[in-house]
Amino acid sequence: MASSRGMLAPHLSSAQCDALLAGPDAAELDAARAWLEQPGNSLMTLADEDYPRTLLEIADPPAILYCKGQRALLGRPGLGMVGSRNATPQGVRDAEAFAHALSDAGFTIISGLALGIDAAAHRGGLAGAGSSVAIIGTGIDRIYPARNKTLAHQLAENGLIVSEFPLGTAPLPGHFPRRNRLISGLSRGVLVVEAAPDSGSLITARVATEQGREVFAIPGSIHSPLARGCHALIKQGAKLVESAADILDELTWLRQDRPQGESLAACPSQVQQRLAPPVQPESVSDPVLDALDGAPTTLDTLAQRTGLTLDALSAKLLTLELDGRIASLPGGRYQKIH
């Protein structure tokens, strides 16, 4: 023990030496074993074959990831979505609609389980074909914030929750910037929906740029504080997006990518099909299309005609726009393309 401390002392503090030489805590090991015995729980290490390739590209990939849910989602093309915790109702609708459309186009939506934009992005991702992954800044056995408890259970059942922090870790402020680097690291691009000038979402965008990821931002009113962060990103070179199609156009190179272990040469059509927006047969009646009578129609009018909620209607309109079946017009109006 003395010789070991003598070798470590020139390089580490006394507290670090104590921590390294103390060995594993028996109670913590027992808690980890009990957690691993629960359905859907697993540990992923750098030595595992399914460790995400995208994380191996960043400067400091975590040695261990605690996973709850479908860990295979980490091998699929990811799109990060972040934004304000105090989002506007329109920002929440935009985040959920974009996430739904992009999920249906083949992306797994990755966010941080925070209130506001993050939660909306997860809901939209879960509603689509690509599902959603939450990267959290606490131990995976803790739900933070507590108001997202139901959403966390949905992610654990139909998506995935991931943490690099040991079980029981509290939501300390310094953990969330570290979480942000994994959101961008797992993604091919990051979309910022709403952000104030001092928003933590801008940290994610900056890290994404450093990691060589694409950054996208939705513009807003010049009078809205939550648009200023997005406008600053656009001035710095982020791509201004008005529809999910703008993101898909920018990331067309993803059609040449593939999940881990899949041969592109062996199944190019399947890869194209997975990443392309779904197309509805013309013979299938669609209530939203039926509600468009040929003239430009507002969102509120369509909601009255279809009986759909604004969130569900916005998601459906984005999908139809990606399919080339409707056009989005100035003033928040929509028109059927004949």
Image: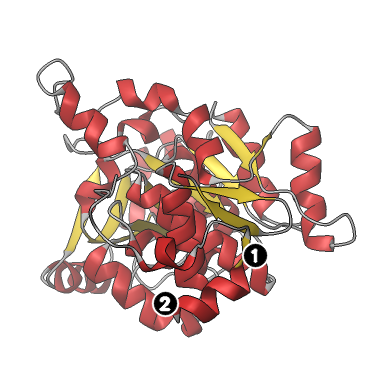
- The quarter holding residue 76 reads top left
* Res 110 visible: no
Name which residue lies at 18% across and 58% down.
42
Nearer the observer: mark 2 or 1; the answer is 1
Q: Which residue is mark 1?
A: 91
| Residue with the most extreme right position | 223
Q: Earlier in the sequence, mark 2 or mark 1?
A: 1
Q: Which residue is mark 2?
A: 143
Counting from the top left corner in percent of width and height, residue 201 is at 65, 53
Counting from the top left corner in percent of width and height, residue 243 is at 57, 46
Name which residue lies at 20% across and 47% down.
72
Up the image or down, 181 lies above or below 257; here it is below
| Residue type for callout 2 | Ile
Up the image or down, 3 lies above or below 136; here it is above
* Res 270 visible: yes
Label 2 sits on a secondary structure element that is loop
| Residue with the most extreme top position | 265
